[in-house]
Amino acid sequence: MAKAQYDNLVKFVNSYVGEAKGPGIVERQMKHCAPATPDTFSAADLQKMAAFIVAAAALYIPDAGKKEEFKTKLASLPL
Amino acid sequence: MATEITSRISISKKILLVSLTFSLPIAVLGYLVVSNIDENSRIAALEASGNAYQTPLEWLLRDTLEHQRLARHCPANTDCKAQMVQLQDGVSKGLVALAAVDAKFGTQLEFTTEGLAKRNRQLATGDNLAKTWHDIVDALDKSQGQSTPDIDAKYADVNGIINTMITHLGDTSTLILDPVLDTYYTMDITLLALPQNQNRISRMIADAITAFSHEAFTAEDRMTFAANAALLQTSDIDRVNADVQTALNENKNDFHDAVASFQEKLPAGAKEWTDANVKLVAMTKDLATAATPAVTLDEYIDTAVKAQQSAFKFWDTAARENDNLFQMRVDFYNNRRNFSLLMAAIALLFSGFIAYLVTRSMIVPLNKLTLTLKPGATLLAGSVQQISEASKKGAHDAATTAIICEELTAHADDMRNTAQNLEILVFGHAIKQS
């Protein structure tokens, strides 16, 4: 179940930055919710790392409106 | 212009285009191979249609020669009128059968105005044959069934038309050029030797009628008997038996094993025909040399008629057996064509599969490169913008800087890996850095 939540997050990030970059962004920011791993990932972990994911993903999203949309949707991402 | 067009085509389509370019000459070669096979099959089928056309001509030859014989000489205790009426009925049926095969194969075998004119055989038509035959029937009605020199000339015309038609169908059906030994030697029997034998026996009967009309055989009669016996032996019996032997020996070939029916029926038919003809040869030789004839004219004619009938019977056997071999050859070529097409299709599928794998091995890393480069450009622009904004503000956000560094480092790693994959794709191996 936890892995599905992690995958759901990756899928969401992919939809904005592409499959080539999405998984790496999430993986690199996992350290902010340590000791969580993809297998133990939860909504609480997402809350801890959301700001970092937004900051990293924003580097790949040129459009300001899209950046804001990403931030909003991530905050209410159903996990 | 061409560069502009090709630059817009994706690499997978370009590879497909290259594959199709190389497939084109192979397709042309394949077409030529199949055409060649079809041509061989067509020739065998054409030969069979020649046999089909000759069949009613043989019936007509048999009945008209017999009709002529009875018109010339009616043996004792024979109801020749009734027999001649029966033969006329046979000729009528033969003409109907000839019209039917002409409708089916006439154009193919060039029994057309142009085809016949090209070979100076304009008179060799079914219509002309029917007309000349009806002239004979009308003339015999007027002469009360007795042959006259004029009627004999008409019989010769009928005989000439039939034989010319047989020659014509032999040429146009390519029977005369048969490329396979067993069917070639059987064709020599059906197209050339047996019609010659059938006609020769009629002439021998006519010669005998003339000789027996003399008080005693003249030296010329005896010479004619001797010549006829010698020709019948060498030109017919020896030739046909040599043909039969070669055909049997060569029956096992590329197209089939030795065919049981052919091996059984051809020699059996040949033996029956040979026995009847050998008897005629012996009797003719006797007439050439004996002081007084040992047989009467009717006995001689009876032997000759039996030999002639056996020739028509043997013709039927040989022609049917040859038809069977033609069909086997057609089947062989059809199977070879189907096999060739199947092999070509399998080869095409296999090469298509290999081309797909090769294309995929190129497309996947190239696609990855595209997916890496495009967001990489955005990343660089975004990073520069953030750094620039932070510099202007004079306040550096350590967390943001760390994220930028991480993403740039990750992107650099991606670029390095992608570049290495590209090197492998282009050169087959990664290039060592000096």
Image (cartoon, coloured by chain):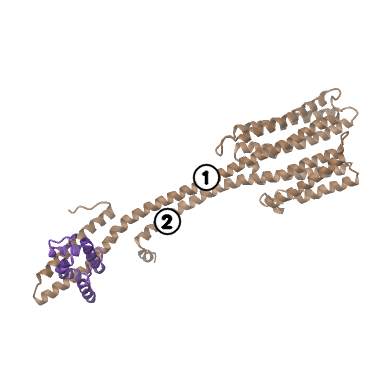
Tell me if residue B243 can be seen: no
x 87%, y 47%: residue = B139
**What crowding class fits label 1: few (fewer than 14 Cα within 10 Å), some (14-19), or many (20 or more)?**
some
* Mark 1 vs 2: CB contact within 8 A: no
What is the quadrant of residue B21 in the picture?
bottom left
Please determine if labels 1 and 2 lie on a single subunit: yes
What is the quadrant of residue B197 in the picture?
top right
x 74%, y 42%: residue = B58
Screen quadrant of the N terminus of chain A: bottom left
Drawing shade for chain A:
purple
Q: Whole-percent x and y of residue B346?
A: 44, 49
In depth, the one of B60 and B170 nearer the eye is B60
Mark 2 residue type = Thr
Write down the residue under mark 1. Answer: B336
Question: Which callout, 1 or 2, points at the residue further toward the start of the chain?
Answer: 2
Drawing shade for chain B:
brown
